[in-house]
Amino acid sequence: MSVKVSVVIPVYNPGPYIEDCIASLLRQSLPDDAYEAIFVDDGSSDGTPARLDELAAEHPHMHVVHQEPSGWSGRPRNVGTDRARGEFVMYVDNDDWLGDEALERMYDYGVANAADVVVGKMAGKGRPVPLELFRVNRPKANVDNAPLIDSLTPHKMFRKEFLDKHHIRFKEGRRRLEDHVLVAEAYLLASNVSVLSDYVCYYHVKRDDASNAGFQRFDPVGYFQNLREALDVVEHNTEPGRLRDKLYRRWLRNEMVERLRAQRFLKLPEDYRKELFDEIHSVVTERMGPGVAAGLQPTQQVVAALITTGRFADVEPYARWEAGIKPTGRLDSLEWDEEGRLALGLTAEFQVDGAPLRFRTEDGQPQLDLPFDPETADALRAAGASTRATVDKARVGLVVKERASAAEFYQPIDFTVDRVPLASEGADAEAAREPADGGDFRMVLRGLGTIDPGTAAGGGALGPGIWDVYVRIIACGWSKAVRLGSVRDETVDKARRSALSGEPRRLVMPYWTEGHGNLSLDVDCATNWINKDLAPLTPRDLAFSDGTLRLPVPLHAAGEERVLLRFKPVRKGDAPKEVPATVAPGDGGAVLTAALPGPELARAAWTMDLGVPSARRGAPRWTPLPLGVKVRADGRPAFAAAPAVTRAARAGRTRSLPRRIMGRVRRTFRRA
């Protein structure tokens, strides 16, 4: 079999962080003879060279190249590319890792769409990754019809013939943004770029020691000289006008404006701030026409205007104001619908210093309430910056994020944007829903979203584990996310239920996180929250007649679901007894129904377990019920709390147990 994919990994002193990368390569679903990994050791001085030699000796499709240190990752990647035998080349950093099916899926997708470049969905572990780009699959993408320019890291799959034909290689030496130069050129020259968004292909990881090369402080002069080289690529391959301005805007926004905003700017040493600002000012005035900044969001246009006009003294006050702006979210409702989807009602808005973020209305137009004096405000307007608050374009997103991998997926949501007047305080102002014609107002977003466990992961099912739920507010140039659930309506706790979902069936459980009370989804019993949900059950909840017991359980059931009930003996030597059971809709939740095998349980005391299906285990997940039963010789049961049954049985008082509790049980049954 010919090699489909060559994975090139530049390596320099990764220590133990390379192990996750190696493990992910060995787990790939492609057959070993269909791909190769080329580790290019760039003069590592730790134990990595020996580790890689050992790996190559054990696995014929793993190769190692040792070379003298070159100072950066450009040369190692080029060496690996020149040695690659695959139809495609995939670049992976030594402290990141791949999804198990990444190479197979990306290769097949690239071939199916005749792509020169394949961009796989990324997840950021402590690192930001593009979100908008990966909302949907984009089989036929380019820099004009998709936000490709948002993703300029090299962690993509490139057709080897395409790289060779256009002599595309990384710039070498100790430098920055060599990946921007290569990826921008590839985007602009490719016949087609395909974006695969329904599977997480690449995990971009921040080390625990934050020693990744991209996290080290840079020399502004050298950095922005390298950035100019990326701009040169765009200039060489585009004509002046809208598209060039759109592409330039990516570097203005991400590499310049965003570095001067909020905490990212305030965390910098004061002497470094001015040096950084001066270099950014130099690039903007040299290379960026007015059409570049004009396409930014208003809050970004403000910073761009400060840069253009050289108003460094105003950057810090603006950064402090923005740093105080926080997103808030309230969970208003939570329930399973008839389609097996979890429906969530929510309210979200921005706050600053604990109060709603204030917007102004001037000449009928909403405006940002900026922290500037009139002179600065006039200078910004003269520089062309818009201070209009684009609340009419505000969006709210419902996001689920896998805790282990940091994979994020947007969920369907319908929402409204309301301007609530701030002219008066109290219930009247809060109840107002119509846009304000004048005066100050707050922006309130109200949404109804759904999470379908079978399709929530980019069209696929949520995998087993913990999925945290976020609300993201996108407005006026801010994109801020906050956990959902810690602030919630009092009805939500009563409505919270677990549900069986998917094929094969598994339990999906909404629950509140310890300490913070945020909403998370436990998929396939990754936690013990089901134990907590079942703990409040008491013998008074049971009903028994005609040999059948019925028990209301805190589950959601749209129809009849098959489960198991297990009776575990208190006395040693007896074997557990399992019986089929069902969970079906009932008042306030669901009702568990099972036949009680009285003769098999006679003359013994038993505790009870509920067994729910588990796709991950391939066998039931057993959870103890807080109930026990003592069955008399004639098959009549007496139920009590499980601890009482266990204590009585172990104390040798099983004969007296029925007499002590039978009266209470009978009264309970009569009331039921």
Image: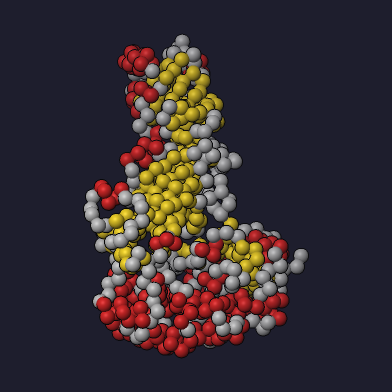
- Colour scheme: secondary structure
The N terminus - image quarter: bottom right
Q: Nearer the viewer, residue 481 or 11?
A: 481
The image quarter containing residue 641 is: top left
The residue shown at (46%, 82%) is 290
Tell me if residue 73 comes above or below residue 33 in the rendering: below
Task: Evaluate whether residue 423 shows in this view.
Answer: yes
Tell me if residue 318 comes above or below residue 539 in the rendering: below
Q: Residue furthest left?
A: 425
The image quarter containing residue 89 is: bottom right
Q: Is residue 653 left or right of residue 222?
A: left
* Image spot of residue 34 (x, y percent): 71, 64
The C terminus - image quarter: top left
The image quarter containing residue 510 is: top left
Q: Is residue 535 left or right of residue 600?
A: left
* Image spot of residue 157 (x, y percent): 63, 70
* Image spot of residue 516 (x, y percent): 32, 51
Tell me if residue 155 comes above or below residue 285 in the rendering: above
* Image spot of residue 411 (x, y percent): 50, 52
